[in-house]
């Protein structure tokens, strides 16, 4: 089984998605330096303060944005392949793990994702037009349903635990359908919030029904 250096973080990296990191701990300065020297990837896994998740995503450093005199680094990484942890190894200052890579299962020819993919792209456009800071950061080509599903799941508005569920899904169709459902709730919540701000800005008071709608849009 391949072995990866591990970087537990309070976030989830998804395949194809960019992630900037500030490297300041000594063990991770060492880890990233070794990965750069050998042109190797490392693994990012979600850590909730108590335990790390059993599935993660490999990351490759695509650019060193800045180096500091004390060895700290600002780097830009990109997610590559998903993996399951089989055994954690503690022989270096940082963790390593024996891992097994996995990917989506082949989809049925009957799964036509054209309509749901178009809905997802339309909702992303609505999100961008709303002025929300959440969004697709790198102008990615979202014509591929698999990539689109990961791009939606990577939005800042989606909580790490929900991102983790998307990471672990092995069906592009299921992940796309579920991520578009979540995105629709996000867009609706932002629209209702902006509506309330508009009312308050006019010295009005939001109807209780509108407040209830915002609360409901965050459920699930």
Image (tube, rainbow, N blue to C red):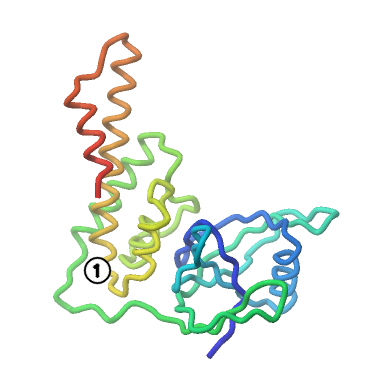
Could you say which is closer to the camera, residue 63 or residue 19?
A: 19
Residue 118 falls left or right of residue 128: left
164 up-or-down from 95: above or below: above
Q: Position of residue 67 (x, y in %)?
A: 78, 56
Q: Residue furthest top?
A: 203
Circle 1 residues within 10 Å: few <14, some 14–19, many ≥20: many
Q: Secondary structure at mark 1?
A: helix
Quarter of the image where one finds residue 37: bottom right
Left or right: 197 with respect to 68?
A: left
Establish if 208 lies above or below 47.
above
Q: Quadrant of residue 21?
A: bottom right
Q: Please, is residue 54 above or below residue 152 in the view?
A: below
For the residue pair 24 and 109, the one nearer the viewer reads as 24
Residue at x-position 19% and y-position 79%: 108
**Which quadrant would residue 140 be assigned to in this image?**
bottom left
Disc 1: which residue: 173
Q: Residue at x 31, y 19 (%)?
A: 198
Looking at the picture, does residue 109 appear above or below residue 122?
below
Question: Where's residue 102, x and y in %?
Answer: 41, 81
Q: Where is residue 206 drawn, in percent x and y?
A: 24, 19
């Amino acid at each position: 089984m391949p072995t990866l250096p591990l970087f537990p973080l309070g976030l989830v990296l998804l395949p194809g998605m960019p992630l900037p990191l500030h490297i300041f701990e000594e063990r991770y300065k060492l880890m990233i330096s070794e990965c750069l020297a050998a042109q190797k990837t490392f693994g990012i896994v979600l850590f909730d303060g108590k335990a790390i998740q059993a599935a993660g995503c490999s990351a490759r450093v695509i650019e060193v944005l800045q180096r500091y005199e004390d060895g700290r680094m600002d780097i830009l990484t990109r997610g590559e392949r998903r993996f399951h942890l089989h055994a954690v190894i503690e022989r270096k200052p940082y963790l390593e793990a024996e891992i097994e890579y996995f990917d989506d299962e082949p989809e049925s020819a009957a799964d036509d994702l054209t309509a749901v993919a178009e809905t997802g792209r339309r909702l992303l456009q609505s999100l961008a037009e709303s002025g929300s800071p959440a969004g697709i950061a790198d102008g990615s080509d979202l014509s591929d349903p698999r990539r689109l599903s990961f791009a939606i799941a990577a939005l800042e508005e989606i909580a790490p635990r929900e991102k983790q569920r998307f990471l672990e899904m092995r069906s592009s169709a299921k992940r796309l359908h579920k991520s578009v459902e979540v995105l629709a709730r996000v867009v609706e919540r932002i629209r209702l919030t902006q509506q309330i701000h508009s009312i308050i800005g006019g010295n009005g008071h939001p109807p209780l029904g509108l407040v209830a709608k915002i609360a409901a849009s965050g459920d699930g």
